[in-house]
Amino acid sequence: MAAPGVTDPHRQASVVAQHAAVIYNPIKVDLKKLRASVNAAAQSAGWADTLWFPTSEKDAGQQATRRAIRQGIAMVIAAGGDGTVRAVAETLRDSEIPLAIVPSGTGNLLARNLQLPLGSIDDAAAIAFGGEDRAIDLGVASVTGVTGDTDDHVFLVMAGLGLDAEMIAATRPDLKKQVGWLAYIDAGMRVIPKAVPFRIRYSVAGRADRSAHISTILIANCGTLPGNLQFLPEAQVDDGILDIAMLQPKGLFGWLKIWRRVSWENGVLRRSKTGRKLIEATEENNERTMMTLQSADIRITVDNPQPFEIDGDEFGSVRALFVRADPRALIVKVPAASS
């Protein structure tokens, strides 16, 4: 028994001990290794026993996360692909409960943009229990489908309308398992030659409607794609702004110009002062094939329904979108500054 006025350290530890929950995709993770890494990191940090919730075909992670919240957890670890991470983030929105990520998919888009470790479960688990909290934005898409019903969906990295979504739909699952994100290139080679541009009407920040004839429009919360492609290098995950790209290439040469801009200009030239001057000198010509803008929100309507995707998942065909940023609505665990 502790002396009067002295707190029993064992009793104090039991009072402040916190639980984490792991929402995991049993198809994407090695559960034995995941348990070992998470339990070791939790024990080292003085946390109580971790709770475990698998996803399923009927629940991508939203229901599991709600069950975990009801049990009073202090942090949720999402272990799986981008779909699992997005489902957990959607449920944690504005909850102030931190999200930690153990990347286990082929894209790992948010993890790449936050520069989280992709190849080590131990490192990811250590960041979950020993990292810092960082508030980031979420994208929210109000999607009007072909039936006229409107539903809200959260995204972490990027939403795409048109050809981008067609490429997602055309990606072969067997090839994706073999070569990862490179399977999207195979899909692009099959889809691009058949692509038919379409007309949209759009309005940013409540301004007057404008029209454009495009192949695809991408709305980004952050701008790095697999392969470290700097698609929208000015996009910041916590600036309260969406970065928007409208792609309107003419033929194969137009697509090659877009590839040059993303891989060479954004990935190489932008790193130096001289390179940035070269980019500025050709900016007007670039805008003809890839127009970019920034706004806290954008409304889009299409003459004919177009396929839509969010963070690499298909969401069917849509007639209209209202996409907006939800500033700093999610807390994520990132490496501590000292490390």
Image (cartoon, rainbow, N blue to C red):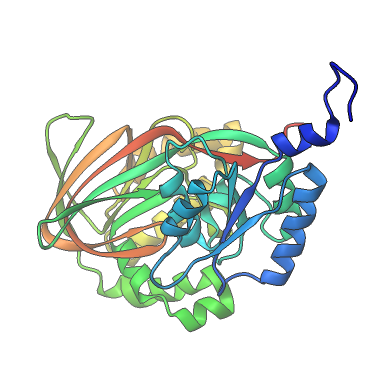
Task: Pick whichever, 284 or 131, lies toward us.
Answer: 131
Seen in the picture, residue 31 relative to 258 is either above or below; the reply is below
Where residue 115 appears, as percent x and y from the top left, is 63, 46
- Write the residue at 32% across / 32% down: 296
For residue 227, side relative to residue 8 (left or right): left
Where residue 15 appears, as percent x and y from the top left, is 71, 35
Task: Pick whichever, 66 or 223, lies toward us.
Answer: 66
Where residue 196 appears, as percent x and y from the top left, is 20, 67
Seen in the picture, residue 274 relative to 157 is either above or below; the reply is above
Q: Quadrant of the C terminus?
A: top right
- Write the residue at 56% across / 42% down: 269
Tell me where residue 208 sits by quadrant.
top left
- Write the residue at 60% across / 38% down: 271
Observer able to see residue 156: no
Task: Pick whichever, 235 or 1, lies toward us.
Answer: 1
For residue 87, side relative to residue 219 (left or right): right
For residue 238, side relative to residue 45 (left or right): left
Observer able to see residue 49: yes
